Amino acid sequence: MERAWPDGIAEDETGIQWDFLRFHRATAVNKVAGLTRDQAAATPLPSSPRMSALGLLKHLTAVERWWLSIEAGGADLPSLWEGSPDPSWDLSEDDDPRSVVEAYRAEWALSESSLAGVSPDDRARRSGKFTVRWVLAHVLQETARHVGHLDVLRELADGTTGE
């Protein structure tokens, strides 16, 4: 997936946050490109036995659904991570790189449309406990953090390193 590094002379706070989020989303998707289902579903980290590349993308899908669409945007949608332990990491037999990426990308459109017309200073429509600025920053940092995990999982899967 093509990525664009955000403009270094950014003047719009919300715009730059969205640009960095889009960059990290594309990076996350690229980390599973070319992996087989078995490679992308592997859980090679003993300290994190549920963490797979596909599970991370499913979790990021759930993060976007909850924080951007439901919490900030007030959308009436089902949460993808209700339960204990968090089920967003779990894979079904039908999950493969193509289907998980498609679901993640569909969530991007939903997230962005849920926040159409809100400003950074607006309160989250669901609880009012956060500003939209805070929610967007939270999702950005969570996505960036998990892209780092995907770097490691990709290298363990097939030795590929890089951006």
Image (cartoon, rainbow, N blue to C red):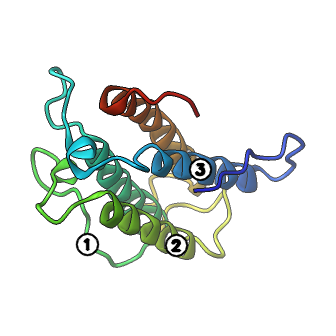
Q: Secondary structure at mark 3?
A: helix
Is 154 situated left or right of 80 in this image? Answer: right
Mark 2 lies on a secondary structure that is helix
Residue that lies at the very extreme toward the top in this rendered image: 47
Q: Nearer the viewer, residue 84 or 37?
A: 37
- Left or right: where 27 falls relative to 46: right
Looking at the image, tell me whether mark 1 or mark 3 is earlier in sequence order. Answer: 3
Residue 151 is situated, as x and y percent measured from the top left of the image, at 44, 31
Amino acid found under the numbered disc labelled 2: Ala
Q: CA distance from mark 1 to mark 3?
A: 23 Å
Residue topped by disc 1: 78
Is 133 placed left or right of 154 in the picture? right
Q: Residue at x 54, y 45 (%)?
A: 27
| Residue 38: x %, y % from top left | 20, 46
Q: Residues within 10 Å of mark 3 (few under 14, many from 20)?
A: many
Query: What is the three-letter code of the residue carrying label 3?
Result: Leu
Q: Quadrant of the N terminus?
A: bottom right
User: Disc 1 residue type?
Assistant: Pro
Q: Which residue is mark 3?
A: 21
Q: Earlier in the sequence, mark 2 or mark 3?
A: 3
Residue at image position (24%, 62%) is 80
Q: Residue at x 25, y 47 (%)?
A: 55
| Label 2 sits on residue | 109
Across and down, in percent, residue 30 comes to 50, 48
Place of residue 93 in the rendered image (x, y in percent of width and height, measured from the top left) = 11, 61
Tags 1 and 2 touching, CB below 8 Å: no
For disc 2, the neighbor class at 10 Å (few under 14, some 14 to 19, many from 20) is few
Quadrant location, the C terminus = top right
Quarter of the view holding residue 103: bottom left
Q: CA distance from mark 1 to mark 2?
A: 16 Å
Report how many numbered discs are placed on residues in the image.
Answer: 3
Estimate the spatial distance between the alpha carbons at disc 2 and disc 3, rounded to whole Å.
13 Å
